[in-house]
Image: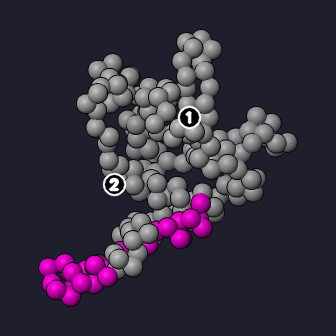
Amino acid sequence: MIDYFDNPAMSQSKLKDLKQSPKHFWIKHLSPYRIKEEPTEAMQFGTLVHTCVFEHKKFLSNYIVMPKFDKRTKDGKAGYLDFATKNADKICVDEDNYTNAINIRAAVLNKKTSSILFSKPGLIEKELYWKDEITNIDCKAKLDYFIEPCSQFPNGFIIDLKTTINAKPDEFANSLFKFG
């Protein structure tokens, strides 16, 4: 089966690029010279939080806090190299991001609504594929967390977790608008 990101079907992200302009869409998705973009720090933090909230065991086994090493010194370089070698299978993050992810998870799980939603078994990173009936375009979506239809949620329920720099209502609304 083809990887979700390699699948050429239309997605929300592609639609955002098309909304910006057809040229942006072409450059990012169709051009033979397109360059795969590296995840930004914000995207990496979002992935860290998603893993911490939805896949906590995976978070604990895959992520590790990178100690601070003074790489200008011989001991610092040696300590860094030793740590990196021993933890080559882990994703190293700084202590602030690691702690923030854990605190966000605690805040999410502390909410009454979250406790109800997460009491139901859900599918993490659920991939959906379909053909749009009107345009006949192949489409795809990747849901953060999907609760399948049940008595409490007859149509199922989608959870889409977002991180933001500022959670004040006006700032969060601006982020929603800015990032579509």
Q: Can you give x and y, in whole percent of width and height, for residue 116 in the image?
A: 74, 54
Q: Nearer the viewer, residue 38 or 13?
A: 38
Looking at the rendered image, the disc whose residue lies closer to the viewer, 2 or 1, is 1
Q: Which residue is mark 2?
A: 41
Q: Residues within 10 Å of mark 1 (few under 14, many from 20)?
A: some
Picture layout, residue 111 above or below residue 174: below
CA distance separating discs 2 and 1: 23 Å
Specify the amino acid type for callout 1: Ala
In the image: residue 147, left or right of residue 83:
right
Picture layout, residue 153 above or below residue 134: below
Rendering quarter of residue 173: top left
**Residue 114 colored magenta?**
no
At mark 2, the secondary structure is helix
Earlier-in-chain disc, 2 versus 1: 2
Rendering quarter of residue 148: top right
Residue bounds of the magenta highlight: 55-82
Residue at the location (46% across, 54% down)?
A: 47
Specify the amino acid type for callout 2: Glu
Residue at the location (19% across, 78% down)?
A: 71
Q: Which residue is mark 1?
A: 141
At mark 1, the secondary structure is strand
